[in-house]
Each structure stands twice: as C-alpha cells, then as structure tokens.
Image (tube, helix red, strand yellow):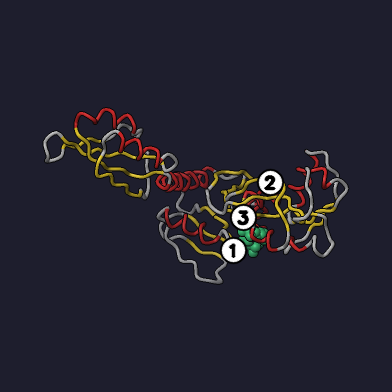
Amino acid sequence: MKNNSILRLAIQKKGRLSEDSLRLIKECGIKFSNGTGKLKSRAGNFPIEFLYLRDDDIPDYVADGVADIGIVGENVALEKGKNIDHIRKLGFSRCRLSLAVPKEVEYTGIEYFQNASIATSYPKILRRYLDENQVTAEIHEISGSVEIAPSIGLARGICDIVSSGSTLMSNGLKEVDVIMHSEAIIIGNQNLDDEKKSILDQLLFRIESVQKGKNSKYILLNAPNEKIEEIAALLPGMRSPTVVPLAEKGWSSIHSVINEDDFWQVIENLKKAGAEGILVVPIEKMIF
Ligand code: PRT
Ligand code: ZN
C-alpha cells in the first residue's frame, strides 16, 4: 500500500449520530482529536481523515467522492443517496420512519391518506411507499417541525422519524404505520481504488470485532466434573469451552463465550445443570 493513501470518512458534525460515530472510531483503536469547530481532522495511528458535515449532505459528498465513506441514518441514505453503496449497519441511532395522524382520527388503513396531504422531510421514501400501496396523496416537503403540520391545517397527517413516540404524543398525534426501521450505517463511494478498499477492509474488520464483543459475554463457572459434559453442551462458545481443574478435587472451572441475546436463558439452564459461582464479564473485542 502506498503510504499516501488515506480514507476520508464523513461524520455528522453535531447531532444524534456524532457521539456514537466518534465512540465507534475510538473503540476501533483509532486516535484523533476533534476540536470543536474543526471541518476535518486526521487520525494519528490509522490512514483515515474525518470530515465533519451535516448529515443530509453526506450521501452526496460520498457519491461525488469528496468523502470515500460516511456514517448516516439509513433514512437519510435512502432519501438523499443515489449511487452509493450501503456497506454495514452499525446498530446505533435506531428509529423508525412512520406515518402519524391526529389521535382522535379513527384510522382504518393507508386509504386514509387517499387524496390527502402529508407533511414530511422524506418525500422520496414516502412517495415510493404510497406508490407501492396505490395511494395518491399530496406531499408537502418541510425541513423541520413536521409534527405541527396537522394542527396548523397544513396536512392531514405526517411522515416523520419516531423514536420514543413522545414528540408525536405531545403534539396530539399517533403513529399508525411504520414505513421503515432505520439505524446508522456506513455508506461508501462506488469507485474506491484498491488502496482505499484495503483501508476500508481493515476498518470494517475492527468494527466487526467491536460489535461481536458487544454482543457477547465471557462466562466462567464452577461445576462438579460429572456435570462437565452436560454444561459444555449448553455453551456453544467460539469453539468448545475451556475446562480447568480446580484445587478442590472433583471440581472444574469452565470458561466460554455466550451470546447476549440468549444470555438469561443460558444462565437459567446452567444453574439447573449444577453450575455454581457463575461470573459474567464484558468482552472488549472479539477476533476470529
Ligand atoms: O444538523 P444535521 O442536519 O446534521 O442533523 P439533523 O438535525 O438533520 O439530524 P439529527 O441529529 O436530529 O438526527 C440524525 C439521525 O439520527 C437521523 O437521520 C435518524 O437516522 C437518527 N435518529 C434517531 C433520529 C431520532 N432518533 C429522532 N428521534 N432523528 C430524529 N429524531 C427526531 C424526530 O425527527 C422527531 O422530531 O426526534 C423526534 C422524535 O423523537 P421521539 O423520541 O420523541 O419519538
Ligand atoms: Zn440533517
């Protein structure tokens, strides 16, 4: 690899994606300083440069090659993005893009919006969804405070990002249909050269290790030797569990890795099978 090759990553300057995007980069062991007000900065120990931008601008910059890759919500990638690759989901900034109507409306289905007007900042995604459902409606594109549109008589309903639902509730609205679920993703330029692709692969490898670590826990427990086989069968682990004899005769310590998703079920089963002194420890990174 030529040492002058550098991958330019666009991240949101200030907003809901910024903190988690920077945390992920740090967890990948990449060191940088991001002084406030900076437009860009360079990592000290990895060939990557950061561009700090408004999230809505990131898909275009990536498509044009001003940035090589970027982190945005899938909602923005789909709305603004043309000719970009969707490379990897990142698991943070989860939300949904939904249709909402005044709470007193008796909503029976998407036909409610037939010939109605809908306010949104996501006209492209909304239009596609309405077309798929054979609904003809007028779309009012507005860039902020979409939730006030029904109360000022601008629209019959809205299509907006929902997370906890409290914004809808405090504006007298209710969510009636989810158009898409969204989370932060890495998007990429479609014509990266081999050197940039190779840096991207290294970055993705690190991200994957961090993500796998987060989804897993290291577990240590004690068990009587005659129970080892039964307990080992409950622990899928990376290969098979490590079994170490304890000083106390007839007992062993068993170590393994378990998945966060079935964590409590596995613990229950281990206790039933005779496991004692169970310790569960977070994993920072997992390399295969
Ligand atoms: O300034 P810039 O253009 O960069 O930022 P922005 O203001 O456009 O975006 P920002 O920082 O608000 O959001 C960035 C991304 O975070 C979005 O594109 C989504 O992918 C994701 N995200 C996650 C959210 C939310 N949760 C969210 N709750 N984006 C917006 N909201 C807003 C929503 O628009 C609504 O006003 O929060 C309100 C709803 O929240 P609840 O919790 O009341 O339901
Ligand atoms: Zn934005």
Report if the beta carbon of the residue with label 3 is closer than 8 angstroms to ligand 1: yes
Q: Horizontally, is 100 left or right of 203 in the view?
A: right
Using the image, tell me which numbered label, if any, was put on residue 188: none
In this view of the protein, which residue sits in the foreground, 241 or 156? 156
Q: Furthest-right residue in view?
A: 115
Q: Residues within 10 Å of mark 2 (few under 14, many from 20)?
A: some
The residues tagged by marks 3 and 2 sit, at their Cα atoms, a distance apart of 12 Å
Mark 1 or mark 2, which is nearer to you?
2
Residue holding disc 1: 15
Secondary structure beneath label 1: loop
Q: Is mark 1 within 8 Å of ligand 1?
A: yes
Q: CA distance from mark 1 to mark 2?
A: 23 Å
- Circle 3 residue: 163
User: Is the CB of the residue bearing disc 2 within 8 angstroms of ligand 1?
Assistant: no
Residue 275's place in the image compared with 36, above or below, is above
Q: Is residue 66 visible?
A: no
Residue visible at 40% across and 55% down in the picture: 29
Residue in the foreground of this view, choosing between 193 and 105: 105
Labelled pair 3, 1 in contact (Cβ < 8 Å): no
Residue flagged by tag 1: what amino acid is it? Gly
Does label 3 or label 2 sit earlier along the sequence?
3
Q: Which residue is mark 2?
A: 178
Q: Residue at x 80, y 60 (%)?
A: 150
- Quarter of the view holding residue 286: top left
Residue 116 point in image, percent of width and height: 86, 51
Q: CA distance from mark 3 to mark 1?
A: 15 Å
Nearer-the-camera pick, 19 or 29 = 19
Residue type beneath disc 3: Ser
Q: Nearer the viewer, mark 3 or mark 1?
A: 3
